[in-house]
Image (cartoon, grey):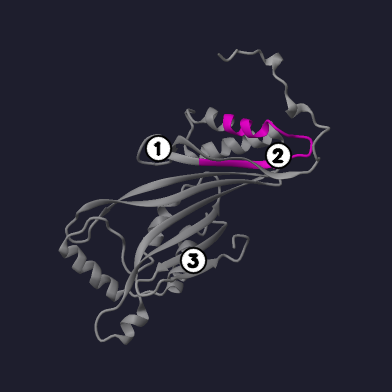
Amino acid sequence: MPRIKSEEELPDSRNILDTFPKDLVPRIGYKNVVIPLLIPSANQGKGIPTIGKVSVSCDMTQDMKGSLINQHRSAIEGLRDSEERTIPTFVDNILEHIQNQFGARNGEVVVEYTILQKKISPVSNLESWVESKASYIGKLVNDNKRFYTSVTGHYTSLCPRSKEISDYGAHSQLSSATIVVEHSSEDVIHNVLLGLIENAGSSKIYNIISDLDESYITEEMYEHPVYVEDVVRKLAVDINSTLGNIVKDYLIEANHYESIHTSIATATINAGKELK
């Protein structure tokens, strides 16, 4: 049967610093820690409950080893039941912990989560939920905090060339766009970004529709053909006009999952700054 030991009995090789290479480790931490968090919402009290997948890392100075990873995990678990456990506040608190407890000048906190949005079909008013992926990211860059939101949303796209050269019909495909933006810590903009994505294609996505809806959506797509490059250009214009006073930098990538090819048509555009 295992014997319960005292702290004094346990050897601690972490404090023996003269037997390991004194090299800077630029990233050490934890990945995929799953904890309950809250998505900020102006309409739902403290926020919408979600499951966050958290990754934390920071640089490790030449005179440290051993205990840093466990301290990362302890910090994450310690904040999960906090009154202020909305995702942006959680990320900011972890960055503070990295700075104050570890003395690190560079680090990163990533929270991946799912957004469910209710969609109502255009003719029959049928309700369904559409899932989108999002991440909230905080970075320490030479002791300076920087914050980012990443979202991936879906839409349909109809090929303009196919419509142009065919006597009837045109091929279309399920499509997605991912937007990464840099902004201030207090800005909560994932729903705005997802709205821009779903309006950039030929039609929106609905998970429950009637025949009347399908007829309407098919014809709507036919009237609004888009190339993949059209989408990223439109999103860049819309971000500048809608969020220009908030967004410091952005990167957009669109992918059209071709229905008549095995390949994926893709396009990328950025603000010409650091995100590339």
Q: Is residue 8 left or right of residue 126?
A: right
Q: Which image quarter is the N terminus in?
A: top right
User: Is label 2 in a helix, a strand or a loop?
Assistant: loop
Q: Is residue 241 left or right of residue 144?
A: left
Amino acid type shown at disc 2? Ala
Q: Which residue is mark 2?
A: 104
Picture coordinates of residue 191, whole percent (x, y)? 40, 51
User: Is label 3 in a helix, a strand or a loop?
Assistant: helix
Q: Which mark is residue 236?
A: 3
Amino acid type shown at disc 3? Ala
Q: Residue at x 72, y 35 (%)?
A: 103
Q: Residue at x 16, y 58 (%)?
A: 124
Q: Earlier in the sequence, mark 3 or mark 2?
A: 2
Number of numbered labels in the structure image: 3
Q: Residue at x 45, y 64 (%)?
A: 238
| Residue depth check, mark 2 versus mark 1: number of the one nearer the observer | 2
Amino acid type shown at disc 1? Gly
- For the residues labelled 3 and 2, the Cα–Cα distance comes to 35 Å
Q: Which residue is mark 1?
A: 47
Picture coordinates of residue 209, whole percent (x, y)? 20, 58
Q: Earlier in the sequence, mark 2 or mark 1?
A: 1
* Disc 2 residue crowd, few under 14, some 14–19, many 20+, Cα 10 Å: many
- For the residues labelled 2 and 1, the Cα–Cα distance comes to 31 Å
Q: Is residue 251 magenta?
A: no
* Whether label 2 touches label 1, CB < 8 Å: no
Q: Which residues are magenta?
A: 54-74
Vertical placement of residue 255 versus 5, above or below:
below
